[in-house]
Image (spheres, rainbow, N blue to C red):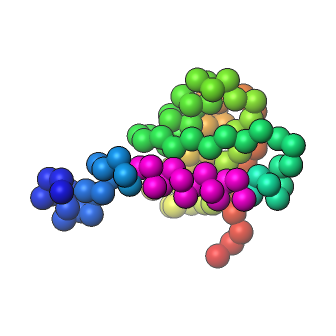
Amino acid sequence: MGHPALRRLRLASLLFPTTRSKCARRSNGALEAVASKHARGVTVRGLVGRGDAAAEIVRMATAEQSDLIVLATHGWTGWRHVVFGSVAEKVLREAPCPVLSVRTAAR
């Protein structure tokens, strides 16, 4: 079940293909639900990658010749932005196509 150090960090499941495919099925199901409600008549495709989020999004959008990238963003500022960075900001700068950034509801 993975390296003992990874098990202690609870990262062992990231190494198993079944976890990745389960994640892909769940995220695609959620995407289809949103698309059927808000994007009727638009072809939507969800992809699951691994690695640096911004770099993977840009890489996949380039490979898929995407027309639009839609991202949710927390809209963090201050120390949270400094510590966590901004995937949306990096994608906006490097994307090969337009990016629609949607701010999530405040919690």
Which quadrant, please, contains the C terminus? bottom right
Query: Which of the 4 quarters of the picture holds residue 69?
Result: top right
Is the residue 89 above or below the residue 33 in the image?
above
Front in this rendered view, residue 86 or 8 = 8
Q: Position of residue 5 (x, y in %)?
A: 15, 57
Left or right, residue 13 beside residue 62: left
Q: Is residue 60 visible?
A: yes
Q: Position of residue 44 (x, y in %)?
A: 73, 42
Left or right, residue 102 beside residue 27: right
Question: Is residue 89 on the magenta stretch?
Answer: no
Question: Is residue 27 on the magenta stretch?
Answer: yes
Q: Position of residue 99 (x, y in %)?
A: 73, 38
Q: Residue at x 48, y 40 (%)?
A: 49
Q: Which residues are magenta?
A: 20-33
Is the residue 55 above or below the residue 71 in the image?
above
Query: Which of the 4 quarters of the picture holds residue 38?
Result: bottom right
Is the residue 13 above or below the residue 93 in the image?
below
Q: Residue at x 56, y 37 (%)?
A: 57
Front in this rendered view, residue 105 or 5 = 5
Query: Which of the 4 quarters of the picture holds residue 65?
Result: top right
Give the total number of marks visible in the rendering.
0
Left or right, residue 66 beside residue 38: left
Front in this rendered view, residue 3 or 23 = 23
Q: Residue at x 66, y 37 (%)?
A: 92
Q: Position of residue 21 (x, y in %)?
A: 44, 49
The extreme left residue here reads 4
Which quadrant, please, contains the N terminus? bottom left
Q: Residue at x 50, y 35 (%)?
A: 56
The extreme right residue here reads 41
The secondary structure that dominates the magenta segment is: helix
Q: Is residue 90 visible?
A: no
